[in-house]
Image: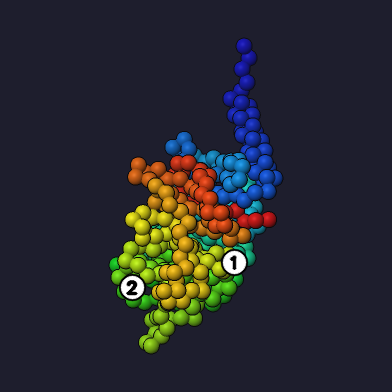
Amino acid sequence: MIRPYPFILNLFILLAISLILTISIARITASGSQQLTLTVKQRGQSDILLLDVDYGLRANLTRSDGDDTFPAWSPDGEQLAFYSRRDERTDLYRMTIDGSGFERLAASGGAETPAVWSPDGTWIAYAVLHFPNGGLFIVRPDGTDSRQLAHFQAASLVWSPDSRYIAFVGNCDGNCDIYVAEIDSGQVRQLTHNGLVDAYPTWSPDSQQIAFISNRSQSFDVHIMDLACDETAEGGCVARQLTFNRDIDSFPAWSPDGERIAFSSNRTGNYELYRMAADCGGQVDCEGQIEQLTAGEGRDINPFWSADSQRIAYWSGYANGRVDLYVVDTVSRINRLVYYKAASGSTAVWRPVQ
């Protein structure tokens, strides 16, 4: 019997996989429904999956021999920045949704905080872990013009909607503070200063305010502050407290329409999702407007809004270590499981609506 040469067989397999992937992506894109990308564990490694939220269609976007994690979409929804472990190191890469245009953008040395694409598409922000050269960096999507903005530890990177600033958490050595880096000037400014923990910044849609969590009130609550605020200055302004309870409120997320702030809290004994009006004021007003969105067995954390502010995706974790991805409709309050048993420590992002 004449057997095909190994390289011909391998080529056929690669072409078949590529064709299946192309068809799967085309079906998902043509469905017209909202889509998420998330990190999943398959064959002992992490890959990035494209998921149709309404119809359950799926396509594996990465199939490398190493772990691919922390996907970040370009504003047009056609390209992904992500971390990948190749050649025994983890660096920042970019590719188009069909797998073409694969390119290494920058040396990162690890993946502990997701990279983020600027809303105008001109920059990708990422953190480098290895010191003394670590810190906050930005790079063009083609891998050119890399710049270092901060020379200290940076995490929870978030672009302002106008693409002029990056808010991030830094200097977490006993405490954490919120910083803002201005792209044009390269100036980095410390916003919070109280010797405690300030973390998880999220921008208002007009790029003028930042919500975050802080334990300055002896428990973790949601606070809000103006971009122009400076707690480091003597007699300067201070953040305004939005939630008031003795438990833990965390993971604030500002809705794209500016109306609501979602967050996770264990105020009922288990972590559930809540939302409140972003413009509430004072303890009675804010606490009185808080609405509970989930009430399940799992610990519901890390909410993130869809672009139309109608849905919130979130992670639900269980005592046995399982982590599932859910989506709740903010109008009907219906919660739906969209992915069962994702990778531990996974992140997910909505694909920008076209």
Residue 257 is labelled as 1
> Whole-percent x and y of residue 121?
62, 63
Q: Identify which residue, 223 or 74, lies in the foreground.
A: 223
Instruction: Indicate left or right for 110 with 56 as reference.
Output: left
Pointer 1 local density, CA inside 10 Å: few below 14, some 14–19, many at least 20? some
Find the distance from the CA under tag 2 to the CA under tag 1: 29 Å
**Which element type, helix, strand or loop, lies under badge 2?**
loop
Q: Is residue 123 visible?
A: no
Q: Earlier in the sequence, mark 2 or mark 1?
A: 2
Q: Coloring scheme of the render? A: rainbow
Picture quadrant of residue 26: top right
Residue in the picture at 68% in, 48% down: 32
Q: Amino acid at mark 2?
A: Arg
**Which element type, helix, strand or loop, lies under badge 1?**
loop
- Position of the N terminus, as image quadrant, is top right
Q: Would you name the residue on which mark 2 appears?
A: 216
Residue in the picture at 48% in, 41% down: 340
